[in-house]
Every structure is written in C-alpha cells, then in structure tokens.
Amino acid sequence: MKIRLLVLSLFASSFAFAADIKSLAPTVVTATRVETNSFDLPVSIDVVSKSNIQDAQLKMTLSESLIRIPGITAQSRSQFSQDPQISTRGFGSRSSFGVRGLRIYVDSIPFSMPDGIGQPGNIDLGSIKAMEVMRGPFSSLYGNSSGGVVQLLTEDAPKTPEIGSEFMTGSYGTSRQNAKATGSVGNVDYLINFSNFETDGYRQNSNAKKEQFTAKLKINISNSTRLTMLANWMDMDAQDPLGLARTASSGSGPKTTYAGASVTVFERSAFDDPTAIPSVASLANTRVSRKNQQIGFNLEHAFNENNSVNIISYVGKRDNLQYLSAFSSTATTTPTMTADFGRASGISRDFWGTEFRYTNKGQILDRAYQLTGGINYGNMEDNRSDINAYSGVMLDSSSLANVNRREINIAKNFDQYLQAQYAVANSIDIHAGIRRTKVDIKVQDNLVDLAQQSTIAKYRDSSGKLSYEKTTPVVGAVWKINPMLNLYANYGKGFETPNLIEIAYDNVTNGTGPNLNLTPSQSDNYEIGAKAFANSSTRINAAIFRTNTDKEIVVASSGTYTTYQNAGKTKRQGIEASIDSQLANNFGIYGAYTFLDAKFDSTFSSAGNTVNSGNTIPGTYRQQIYGEVSWKYPELGFYTALETRYNSKVYVNDRNTDYSDSYTVVNLRAGFQQSVSNWKFSEFLRVENIADKDYIGSIRVNDTNNRFFEPSPGRNWMVGVNANYRF
C-alpha cells in the first residue's frame, strides 16, 4: 500500500512542475531537422552550451567540448598538424587522418566531404553558441559514414551593436588574440570574428600558427523569408612531432649520408622523454601548411505555419601540403631507411554542394505529424601530388624521378531522404526515416609514361572509378510515461564507404592504385534508452546500444604506402549515462559515463599478421568518465569548476600487441565577470593536469613505424581577459 501511494504521489507531483522540466531539456534541430525538445525524441542527443565551449577554454579544437558527451571519444593530440582523435561508439576510432564516422555541420552547412572525411579544424569555436551531438541509428539519415552527427550553431547577433576583444596567454609560449563585432543594421544581423593563435608546443617540433576568420550575415527579407550567409577562412602552419615508440633505439645503428653529412637515425621512447621526437621528424622537417576557405548560404521560407522550405548551398577550397618522413624502423630497434628521406604530399581541393529540404506538419485523425523530405548533392575534386623531399625541401617536380603521385581524385554523392514522426497515441510517438545514398569515386592518373610503363611500376596507369549505393532505413518510438520519464527504442541500417585515402593504393611497394576491390562496410544499429528528471533541477539520460558491422575496412598491408581491405565482422555494444543537476547555493554537478565493448567478430590477416576474433578494436576505450563540480557566486560575478576525466587503457593496433595505460586527469577553471556602464569585462584562469601526471593523451592507430604514442603535457595553465562594449 505504501509503495502504491508513493508511486501515485510521484505521478501526481510530476505534473506540478512539467513546465520547469521542459525548460531544462534543450531544444535541438539535428535529430528532426526542425526545432524539437530533446526530451521527447527517441535518440541520444546532447547539447554543449556556449559557456562550456568558450568560457576558460582554448577554443582551438572540438575535443575541448566533446569530452563532456557520453559515447564520444575526443582526444587532443597536443599538437596541431592533425585533427583531434574523435570517434562515436567506436565509429572512426581507427582513423589516422581527419575525422570519419562522424558527420560535422555548422548551421546545417556540411564540414564533411562526400567520401566521409570531416574537417573540424576549420571551425572557429570563438563564434559558436551551441553544439548538438547525436549518436545512434538516426545518424544514418545524414548519409554515408555517419555513426554520429555533430552540429555546431553560430552565435546570433544582438540588436544592439557590440565590439569585443580577448587576449589569452599560457604555457609553452601559447597565446591567442580575438576580435569580434556583432549587431544589426536594418534587416541585416551580422557577426564578424577574427582570431590569431600561436604556440611553441609541448613537444619538440610542434609549434603552430593559426589564423581564422568567420563572418555571418542574416538577412531578414520578410517575416517569412530569411537568408543566412556563413563564410569561414583559415590559414595554419604547424610542425608535426610524429608519434613516439614504446622503446628507444640505442642510437648505435648504421649511419647514412644525409645532405652531405653522416647521421644516425633512431627512435625515442614516449615514456622516457615525452617531449622528445623521433630523429626523423627533425631530419625530414615534418610539418603541414593548410588553408581553407568556405562560404555557405541557407535560404529559409515559410509558406504558412505548416509548410516551409530550406535551400542550402556551399562552395569552398582547401590546400594542404604535408611534409612526411620516409624513414621507418624495423621490428627491432635497429634503424633503417627507405629510399627517400621524405615526401611532400599535397592536396588542392575544390568542393561544393547543395541541399533542398521541404517540411510539412499538421494533424491526421487529430494526431500531430511532421514530414521532412530532401535531396542532397556534394562534390569534391582533389588535385593530389606526392613528391620526394630532402631536409623538408621539395625536389624538382618537373623530373618524373621525384614524383610518386600526380592525379585528380573526384568524389560525389547524390542522396534523397524522407523523415517523419507521428503521435499514434497521447503518450507514444513514432519516428521513422529512410535515406538513399549514392557515392561515386573516380581517380584520374596524370603520372603515366607509356614508354616506360612495362619497366617502371609507378608510371603505370592508375586510373579507375567506383560507385556505391545503399538505402538506410531507421525507425524509433518514444513512450512518454509521464512528464518526468520517457522511454525509447530505435533501430537503423548504416554504411560507410571507403574514402579517397583508403582506395588510393593497391600495392604497398610500388604505390599503384586505385584499390577497386574495396566495398562499403554495413551495419545494423540498435538502441534503447531512458530520459528522466529526478526532480525539477536534475536530468538523467541513459542508453544501451549495439552495432553489428560487416565488411569492416581495415589495413591490408603497410610499408612505403598503406593499403586497405574489407575484413569480416565487428561488434560494438555498450552503455551511456549522464546526469546534470543544479544544486542549492549555486552548486552544480555534471557527469558522463561510457562503457564500450568493441571487438573484431571474425579473424583476418593484416600486414602479414593474423588478427584474431575477439581482439579489441584499437582506439576504443572500454570505460570513459567525465565529471564536473561547478560553483557560482553571482554577487562577485565569480564562477569555477573542477573537471575530472578518466580513460581506461586503449590498444594501439589490430593485433592488440601494445596498448596505452589508463589515466585520470583533473583540471580547474575559474573566472570573474563585471559590468561597468556599457562595458563588460571578464578574466579567466585554466589549469590542466593539476596533479602533473604523465599520460598518453592520444594514439596513432596502426602506425606502420610503431610510433603509436602522443604524450600529453604535464601541469599547464592559461589566463585571459576579455572586454566588450555595447553601443
């Protein structure tokens, strides 16, 4: 009887603060492509707020904010020559280049390419107000290679113009300057943001410079029509310290003549001197220069309250020149050398795309429904080259003897999708969708000498093309038990095509290609979950998921070049949970937990070795925990938070012969905010790794030279000041 009364009292009290509950669950657009309360959706989706993106943060990589989200692995490499290591529920964990398995958007404009590679380094976090992160089956409605979706939303301009600037400085010669102007003129809202970042880097050969510019214009053409323009520009130069081996070589190996001098090539251990670099990094002067320009438009028009249309288009250009080392180490610590000291790998990319989306909503049989359909087209064209280099200087590209690769790579997608939701009962909503994706890939080899074709392998014609098609359905349901508790379940198909890098070579020695035998990996994705409010100020989310994948894309062989193949099956299953609570006296707690069991489910051969069924997929952490305790003192404009992050050990290669140990780090952030007349000032301090622990913050999965480990800094700090003036 007591239990029954308790249940009835909880049920009754839940309606008393239903309005408060709705205010705690953020509104999102990613899951349904229209604004919807996240609490009522049958998907795992979380929002990172502006304060957690910008306050007391470096604002340089997505990993700073994504570490808060369950199901997401976001590891900073502590250097800027490569994007951070980001994956979702194991998707993308094995990628050693860019971000894959995760679709990235800014204001609905893609920052992922048709072949599935994302480029988060182009995003200016100083202009972002929110970040929506969706995991699970419904991600497949965004197309190829979408185990998850990250949608970033830029700030809206205030009606009163503001100008502001920020200066930050910190450990290892790190500094960042930022200038921003926002406001409205007539029917035009504008935001302009520019930042300049420099660092000497924690490790040797890891300094970086990066400039970014973002401009957003929102033109309110009429009450029912709005045009948003978003332009991004980025220019970066960064040294690449490479990964480090577990064991250092003695340095007594054979010497070789290099640029007229006799030098010894040897490895250094990540665990003896974390700041060190392999000697090949300095010999080849490994580094990258990267530029990116992109502009996108989003035209929104509402015909009436039930019908609206979006037309999205974008165009951009990306240039990437990376100097790589051609030195390699044998299985022992005796250093050896390949034919070249280094290579200059260049990409000049032109890309563009467009999307048309129509939304209709209303009622059928007195039940609410919503229907969204669209078509999407994307195109990228890479002018790729690979030219021998010595001492970080590119050799004469007019001599074919120095050219290893010279070709045009084209990838394009054409997709159609339909997504719907319907309230079949007062407490049950059904969501469903389907997407048809076609990806075409073409390689046009311009390094062909027919007179030498029979004798010199690299002059053979390496042209070819591939086409992939797949229909991916998804369905889910949410049961609204009461205003305090929703249960949901969903299922969906997914697929991931090979990208341009993976199809590049079919021969590890001669570098010929493309590999026309690769096929997409395909997956079945399942999820059940609960969203609940323990009270009017505490939100709890939990989900159990499983993904079965067939034809996983893995390394086939490695050497001067790396080739890929389709292996057998993989299985990823786990648990996600988070809690967000606002306590008395301005205290707050936030916690996120992820358990991930990611395994190869069949045996295959890779690089001449057997990878056994049951091996853990490298780059996946069995357990991850993020915890935060925050406090505010409004009378003084003071805020502070203590952050704790735990990652279990992680395997670095498919054979699971080596791994990086688990670690726990604790960070502190704090700041003051003041308002004086039209001025707003703020000051902040951030201290990372307070306990000064040595740990491996990121790994290079399946590195062919066994340089798997990228150490993170010990205790380090940054301080900053910000001033804003409102007219």
Image: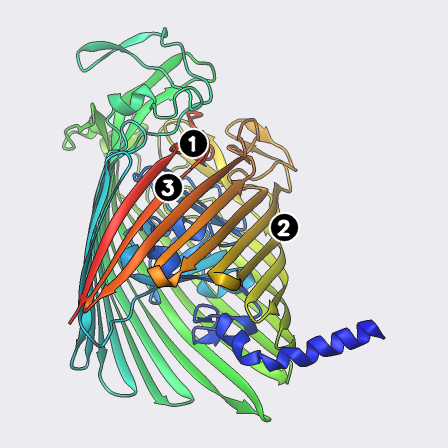
Determine whether, in the image, residue 371 is placed left or right of residue 391.
right
Residue at label 2? Answer: 573
Of the image marks 3 and 2, the number of the one nearer the N terminus: 2
Determine whether, in the image, residue 351 is placed left or right of residue 547.
left
Between circles 3 and 2, the one closer to the viewer is 3
Of the image marks 2 and 1, the number of the one nearer the N terminus: 2
Q: What residue type is labelled 3?
A: Val
The residue drawn where x is 30% and y is 26% is: 325
Vertical comparison of 285 with 137: above or below = above
Residue furthest to the right: 1
- Which mark is on residue 687? 3
At mark 2, the secondary structure is strand
Residue at label 1? Answer: 692
Q: Distance between the residues labelled 3 and 1?
A: 10 Å
Residue density around tag 3, few if under 14, some if 14–19, many if 20 or more, within 10 Å: some
The residue drawn where x is 30% and y is 8% is: 255
Residue 449 spot, x, y in % from top left? 23, 34
Residue placed most toward the observer, 22 or 1: 1
Q: Is residue 116 visible?
A: no
